[in-house]
Amino acid sequence: MPKPAQISQSLRAWMDVFMHRSMRGWAHFAKSTGLSMPQFSILMQLHHKGPCGMSEISERFDITAAAASQLVEKLVQGGYLERAEDPHDRRAKLLRLTVNGEKLIKDGIQERHRWMDELASKLGTDEQAKVVEALVILTEAAKKLES
Amino acid sequence: MPKPAQISQSLRAWMDVFMHRSMRGWAHFAKSTGLSMPQFSILMQLHHKGPCGMSEISERFDITAAAASQLVEKLVQGGYLERAEDPHDRRAKLLRLTVNGEKLIKDGIQERHRWMDELASKLGTDEQAKVVEALVILTEAAKKLES
DNA sequence: TTATATATTTCAGTACACTTAAATAAAAAG
DNA sequence: CTTTTTATTTAAGTGTACTGAAATATATAA
């Protein structure tokens, strides 16, 4: 059996623990809001990437324009999203979170942060320092990889 | 404005980057298998926590026993899951991944691992060492927090 | 044993996410 | 100024995930 690199092994172990906790948390939170997972994902994505057009939604989630339109309609009805006209293209719509929509997502993020803070509180000062250093390294590397 | 602890800040930044990448990846992979997200989640969970009964499924996913039974039925039909009798309680069923089911999930995990390995390869040797040390600390702390 | 609680399934019905096809309106190309 | 492409919506219909209620079988308590 090939000896797996330590770095690979530790990344995997962390991913395993972290992913399960996070996914469960998000699903639970989404359910508590009364929104379906697809609807919730659209809000998340809008929060993360900022306002965008209808077509971007359908591309990113790999659904037809019709499906995107219908999902967005529900979110607009629910008061989470607003559909403004794109000033540069009068065919297109600009989707933007409303104050309520923004608040909803922020609350979800905050709940996730609570777990991370609790985690951090279990660490000693020197451990914390090591973790900070490593996470900065990882985050930078990940961002570079994206582009 | 209150100065946010460094540890908290770095954990959040990492979560942000990592979560988006991972969630997208899983959703994409699940779609490519032809399974629905709820079906896929059940396989994931079974892989993660090992064989369990019907009732555990309905509890963990917060759905009725009826819904769990129907989802499982589809996975059994698809050849991903087997429903054995619980030797200790003849009312209950023991759900276990088949070889195919196991393979499916492992393939998904491997795809996620590829990204992590790519990430790791961008780091220098000393950076890798720091990351390993930190992730071990985090993973241990997270596991303790779970129990 | 009898009564009751538990684990699961089956059925009927609802809601939602999706798709295709057709409609509308505006931009871009000829 | 047509013609064609692009962005979105609407409508009709399909499949899946759910729920509640009722059925079945087994465990557990009286």
Image (spheres, coloured by chain):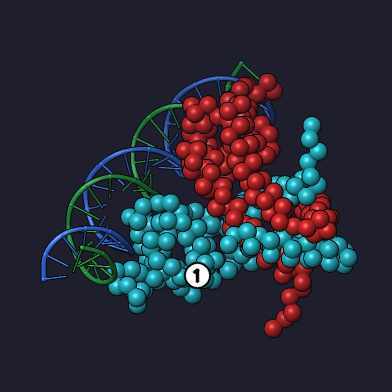
Chain colours: A red, B cyan, C blue, D green
Eyeballing the image, is B40 above or below A9? above
Between C10 and B136, the one lying in front of the other is B136
In-image side of B63 versus B102 (left or right) = left
The residue under the point 50% across, 35% down is: A71
Quadrant for residue A21, please give it. bottom right
Q: Which residue is mark 1?
A: B50
Q: Quadrant of the N terminus of chain A?
A: bottom right
* Residue at position x 40%, y 66% in the image: B53
Would you identify the image quadrant in which residue A94 lies? top right
Residue B126 locus on image (x, y percent): 88, 65
**Three-letter code, disc 1:** Gly
Crowding at mark 1 (Cα within 10 Å: few <14, some 14-19, many 20+):
few
Residue B93 at x, y = what percent?
35, 69
Task: Count how many numbered circles sit on residues in the image.
Answer: 1
Q: Please give left or right for residue A114 compared with residue A32 in the image.
A: right
Q: Can you give x and y, in whole percent of width and height, for residue A121 in the image? A: 72, 52
Task: Identify whether B138 is placed above or below A87.
Answer: below
- Can you see residue A42? yes
Badge 1 element: loop
Judging depth in this view, the residue of C20 and D22 nearest the camera is: D22
| Residue placed furthest toward the bottom | A1
Q: Residue at x 61, y 65 (%)?
A: B109
B45 horizontally vs B124: left or right: left
Q: Chain of mark 1?
A: B
Q: Give the image location of residue A76, x and y in percent.
A: 52, 27
